[in-house]
Image (spheres, rainbow, N blue to C red):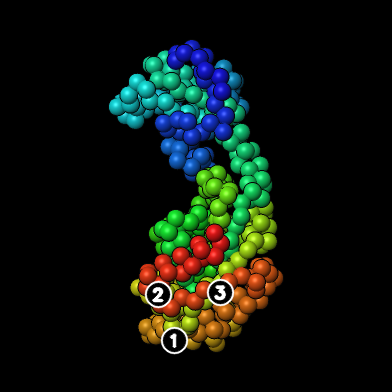
Amino acid sequence: MRCDPPGKRIELAGVADLAGFDEIIDARSPGEFAEDHIPGAINLPVLDDAERARVGTEHKQVSAFDAKKIGAALVSRNIARHLETHFADKPKKYRPLVYCWRGGNRSGSLAHVLRAIGWPAAQLEGGYKAYRKAVMAELEALPGRIRFVVVCGRTGSGKSRFLLALREAGAQVLDLEDLAAHKGSVLGNLPDRPQPGQKFFESLIRAALHGFDPSKPVFIESESKKIGRLHTPDALLARMRAAECLTLEADIAVRVTLLKEEYAHFLAEPALLNRQLDCLVDLQGHERIERWKQLALSGQWDELVAELLVEHYDPAYNRSLGRNYPQAAQGPCLTLASPQAAAFQALSYKALQHFA
C-alpha cells in the first residue's frame, strides 16, 4: 500500500486491504453495481447509466476531448451531490476506499476530491477488474484449505434449519442456499428475494470463505451443481463432494410439517405452486401433475406434500446421493425427532461433538 498526505498523491490499496477502511465506495454506474460489487460496498456513482452511455457515445462519435468535457461536468455535479448528502456528516478521520472499473478516472476523481477536503481516502488499485480477478483465483484456492462437513438428507429433513442451529451453537456454516436466495429445487424460488447475479453470488462465497478459521470444520448442505439459475463454483463443489458427511433423517410427518412452514407462500397462493408444478410434467406425466394441482386447490396439503416427497423428491435424492456424495454412507446419521427448534438444537450439539 502506498500512502501520501491527503490532497496529494492518492493512496492505492489492494484487494487484501479491504478490511482496513471505514467504508467501501463503488463509483461505477448503478447497472455495473447491480451485476456485481464488493460485498458491503455502497454505490455512489459519479456517472449514472445514462450519463455513462452518453459519454461513451461522445467519445466514439466525436472525440475523446469532447467526451472528457461532458464527463467532467457530469462527474463534478454528481460528486457535489454526494458531498452534500452522503458525506455531509462524515468526521475528519473517516477513511473510505473508492473503486471503479479499472481504478481510473471515475474513482480517481472522487478520491481526489475527498482527499482535497481532508479525508484520507484511498483508491483500489486496478479497480473492480482487479477485485474480480482475485475472486476467481481465491474461489479456486480457498476451498482446498477448508475442512467441510456436508449435511445430507432428503427434502424436508430440515437441513437449512439445522445449519441455522449449528451457526447459533457457534459452528462455522456456509449456507449456499441463503447466499443464492433459492431453496435449490424446482419449487425453490423465494417470493420476496430475487436471486443475485452469478458474479455477486461468487463474491458472497469468496467473502464467506475468507471469514472462516481453517482449523475448524465448516458445515455446508449437499448442494448440486445448480442452485436455481446459479452455478456452484467448480473447486468448491469438488471439495464438497470429497468431504466428510452427516445425514439428517426425519419421518414423513415431520418433513411435511417443515415443508409446509418453509413454503407457506404456496399454501397462501396455490395457483403459484401449480404454475411451478408444470415444470415436472416431463418427469411425472400430465395425469399426476393434474392430481397434485387439484390437491393444492382443495387445500389437501399434507397429502400433496407427502406424495411429492415419495413420488418425486425421494427417488431423485436416492439416485443422486451415492453419485455425488459417496462419503454419506460412512458418516453419522442424526434423526430429527420433531420440527421444534429444541430438536434442531440438540442435533447441532451432537454434530459439533462428533466433528470436533
Residue 341 tag number: none
Residue 169 rendering spot, x and y as whole percentages: 43, 59
Q: Earlier in the sequence, mark 3 or mark 2?
A: 3
Residue 182 rendering spot, x and y as whole percentages: 50, 61
Can residue 19 be seen by looking at this rendering?
Answer: yes
Q: Is mark 1 on a helix, strand or loop?
A: helix
Q: Given the image, on which type of amino acid does mark 3 rest?
A: Cys
Q: Given the image, on which type of amino acid does mark 1 rest?
A: Glu
Q: Are marks 2 and 1 in contact (CB under 8 Å)?
A: no
Q: Which of marks 2 and 1 is nearer the N terminus?
A: 1
Residue 333 tag number: 3
Q: Which of 73 and 351 is in front in this view?
A: 351
The residue depicted at 44 percent of the width and 15 percent of the height is 6
Crowd around label 1: few <14 · some 14–19 · many ≥20 (10 Å): few
According to the picture, the residue beneath numbered tag 2 turns out to be 339
The residue depicted at 58 percent of the width and 48 percent of the height is 214
